[in-house]
Image: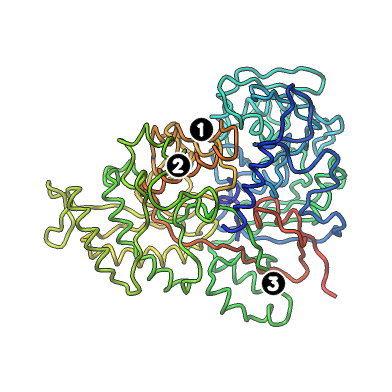
Amino acid sequence: MRISGILNEIAITGMFGLTFALCAGVAAMPRPSAAEPVHGLAMYGEPALTDGFPHLPYANPDAPRGGMIRLAEPGSFDSLKPWVLKGNPAWAVGAHVAETLMMRSIDEPFALYGLLAESVETDPDRNWVEFTLRSDARFSDGSPVTVEDVMWSHETLGTAGHPRYHAAWAKVARMERTGERKVRFTFNVRDRELPMLMGMRPILKKAQWQGKDFAASGLEPPIGSGPYVIEAVDPGRSISFRRNPDYWGRDLPINRGLNNADVIRYDYFGDANAMFEAFKAGEIDVWRELNGAKWAREYDFPAVTQGRVVKSEIPHHRPSGIMGLVMNGRNPVFADWRVRQAMIEAFNFRFINTTLTGGTDPRITSYFANSDLAMRPGPAQGRVAELLAPFAAGLPPGAMEGYALPEGADTALDRKALRRALQLLADAGWTVQDGVLKNAQGRPFAFEILLNQSGSAMRSGSEVQKIVDIYAESLKNLGIVPRVTVLDSAQYVERTNNFAFDMTWYERGLSLSPGNEQALYWGSASANQPGSRNWMGLESPAVDAIIAEMVNADSAEDFTAAVRALDRVLTAGRHVIPVSFAPVSRVAHAASLHHPQAIPLYGDWPGFMPETWWVEPAQ
């Protein structure tokens, strides 16, 4: 099962306190007084790895190479261009074929090291950034990666690419070639994250797309500089990548121990049940189990008992992110916070969690739960309160005072919660009339729950359907009968890209270094931008201001306060009915697959599987 969508934003307490204490320590380290070329950048202070590091700390430089890793994806695809809005792309093209100027280490909250770029330079205030390309960087066809390719890629993605690229590009005042292998970006706003974002844009071959509509979807295999090339494509069914034996960057320290498989193949399935059966039959090599009860009780099939499949639990130290049913605030029905709270009250999480997963995993209590970035219980204090104070009058109830989800009940009928829901609905102008919830004009409370038959990154279609079925039964007690519509993945993507839904399943993976992507998730400018992640339609001056504080924080302490303030506003906004999250990744895999013993901070996160894994036939 894939983790791309939710974890690639892809993106994630105990040890978190130590993590951020270390961040605060490096943030206090002295910075160079003048700009100079360096091997890497960190959001605060200096990168953990010094110039000349031998390999990433979570990679095994002695890993054998060869073999095939077979993975599975739900749904289908009709495009090989994950960088544009149109189409339903095979996301792995972006992971294996294209490269960026710098590469992220998933063992640090936010640090980048040179990949296509041999060095990076920026001023202390990060008003500009300059990259120097490696002289030996090559596309898979043998042609050099040039400054012209870099500049074309940035401008094209920023104007004709997916909307997720547009906001950062709008902050670039000037892009210029400053040397044979140098390109500089000068910014028009203060935003300390921008130099790092410029280093994370995919670099594509300009000549391939000349005279073509880049914004259109398509199945033309893109030419990239990455370690793999597309070997075979069966549209909608499968895609295979073969390791390029002439890959220019195979000997770079940052790549040692990575990209070990000769072939990486992705097969697409109609739903998660079919994927799991294929895994049990040995047709795919990896399965991420999201149900703790199944992990404990149902892994007794022959492949496991005979030792052909092993179970690995991979710890992580990332936030829970948000997952559950999102309400589209563009629909007047869900515009009132009291209605949204009533929908949350009617969702008996305790019963649903126990019924479907045995209650093994905890509930998501806020967007950054399970981390030091999470909002604290009770009233806002200190710097968090200062950030929220100018917007207090317009904040949802609970943002300043504190907010907690209802406890739920062990039985299907949570009478106390339903009474609270009915009162909230009455306060919002909705009452039960002849068994149907209606407003003063007699219009019924009606909405549609839109579902993807293929499921999502973190939940199978059947599991989501079961959750919705139990929820719909509960809503009947309020005089509400939602319409449930199940679509194939292509139709679902089209509708969600254009916000054509009332309620739907929602997943957003969040990292330890939230930044500009938060504006795409829930900033006002993205509320009506097709393809944005702001599915709830949130437009909040407080959210916009707090995101600006986050990306311009000068210390880890100020950054943490800003994220906690954001967490309060989002959670108290009651936009999502959250479910559970797994505090550990449960990965069942072929016994021939191995991963390094050193687990990165982010655990099972993009950049870990399949990149660090290798194939070693069983003896």
Q: Where does the image place residue 142, in percent across and percent down from the top left? A: 85, 35
Q: Are marks 2 and 1 in contact (CB under 8 Å)?
A: yes
Q: CA distance from mark 2 to mark 1?
A: 10 Å
- Relative placement, left or right, of 176 versus 578 is right
- Residue placed under numbered mark 3 in the picture: 282
Residue furthest to the front: 382
Q: How many marks?
A: 3
Q: Nearer the viewer, residue 245 or 553?
A: 553
For residue 360, above or below residue 509: below
- Relative placement, left or right, of 547 versus 115 is left
Q: Which mark is residue 565?
A: 2
Q: Nearer the viewer, residue 9 or 234?
A: 9
For residue 394, above or below residue 170: below
Q: CA distance from mark 2 to mark 3?
A: 47 Å
- Relative placement, left or right, of 31 versus 349 is right
Q: Where does the image place residue 98, in percent across and percent down from the top left? A: 72, 40
Q: Nearer the viewer, residue 37 or 93?
A: 37
Say whether disc 2 or disc 1 marks the residue closer to the N-terminus. 1
- Residue placed under numbered mark 1 in the picture: 549
On the rendered image, what quadrant is the N terminus found in?
A: bottom right
- Relative placement, left or right, of 49 versus 452 is right
Amino acid type for the residue under numbered disc 3? Gly
